[in-house]
Amino acid sequence: MLSFRATVLHLMRRQWRWHVPLAVATLMFLAACAGPGPKELLIDRSINAKSQDSRVEMVVLHYTATTNEASLKILSEQNVSSHYLITDAPRPVVYQLVDENRRAWHAGASQWYGRTDINAASIGIEIVNPGGNGTSWSPYTDAQIDTVITLLHDIVGRHQIKPHNIVGHSDIAPQRKVDPGPLFPWKRLADAGLGRWYSEALKQKYEQEFLQNGLPDIAWVQSELIRAGYAVETHGILDKATRNVVAAFQMHYRPARYDGIPDAETMAILKALH
């Protein structure tokens, strides 16, 4: 009696002229049966390389411009997300919506120190706050800011994030965003050891120099803004785009007035920042 394999091959020879597809399929079946099955991949994870660091380089702060319930629904169900959401409850709740090892969709089209793929290297924190309309803004609660500070200390400590990389959405996208707005207390964060700030003594010194000797030209302002991380063209013209960047800088470092005009105080702060 012929074996199973011999029988199949005999039939294939007889049928080959008329059933080529069947013959090919049968050969593939026999080849699969003849070879060994897939082997389990063995990975040894006992050795950790010394030369490595975190992929997270930045923290971007936002306000949600809506309520707790709406914020949670939007950030968990729609085409936008953040790693953390801080509510405005008397005792704020912190929701972690995205694992820190994964990319949240919070920054959008943005740039900081020349880097454009901000989502890939940042952690996004949304704070429930109604926002503003350009002239009127809603304050943050002390409990919210205390929570932000505590959360930031934890994130910065684990990822070794540099002070100049703790920013607002308006810093990285000044042409389209204003959050977290001029009422966000950046100085309070800086006093807690979080974020970049300027020397008050140097600021006063440079302001007096500018008032006495005149202001630098717009090209200087644009160059200094670039050195501070902002994205702006260096054409020497105070156009709308440049004013938007100056206003974003002012909301962060001189929130008492954020009209986009590079006056002596704004320029002094910009120079003292370095």
Image: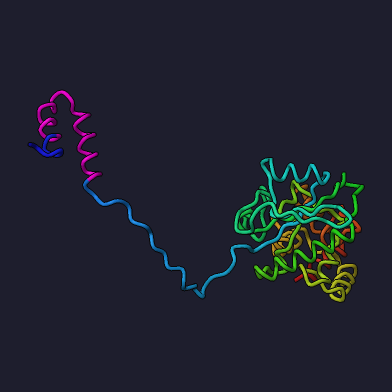
Residue ID at (83%, 74%): 199
Q: Quadrant of residue 214?
A: bottom right
Q: Main secondary structure of the magenta part?
A: helix
Count the numbered circles shown: 0
Seen in the picture, residue 118 relative to 149 is either above or below; the reply is above
Q: Magenta stretch containing residue 26, yes or no?
A: yes
In the image, taking residue 104 as reference, residue 255 lies left or right, namely: right
Q: Position of residue 216 (x, y in %)?
A: 80, 64
Seen in the picture, residue 248 relative to 206 is either above or below; the reply is above
Q: Position of residue 7 (x, y in %)?
A: 12, 34
Residue ID at (23%, 39%): 28
Depth check: give the residue in front, 4 or 50. Answer: 4
View extreme (front): residue: 1
View extreme (top): residue: 18
Depth check: give the residue in front, 193 or 77. Answer: 77
Which part of the image, by quadrant, shows the C terminus? bottom right
Which part of the image, by quadrant, shows the N terminus? top left
Please state the extent of the stretch shown in magenta in the rendering.
8-33
Q: Position of residue 161 (x, y in %)?
A: 68, 68
Residue ID at (51%, 75%): 50
In the image, taking residue 170 as reference, residue 203 lies left or right, namely: right
Residue 232: tell me if it is visible.
no
In the image, taking residue 86 as reference, residue 100 lies left or right, namely: left
Q: Quadrant of residue 165?
A: bottom right
Depth check: give the residue in front, 145 or 236. Answer: 145
Seen in the picture, residue 246 relative to 65 is either above or below; the reply is below
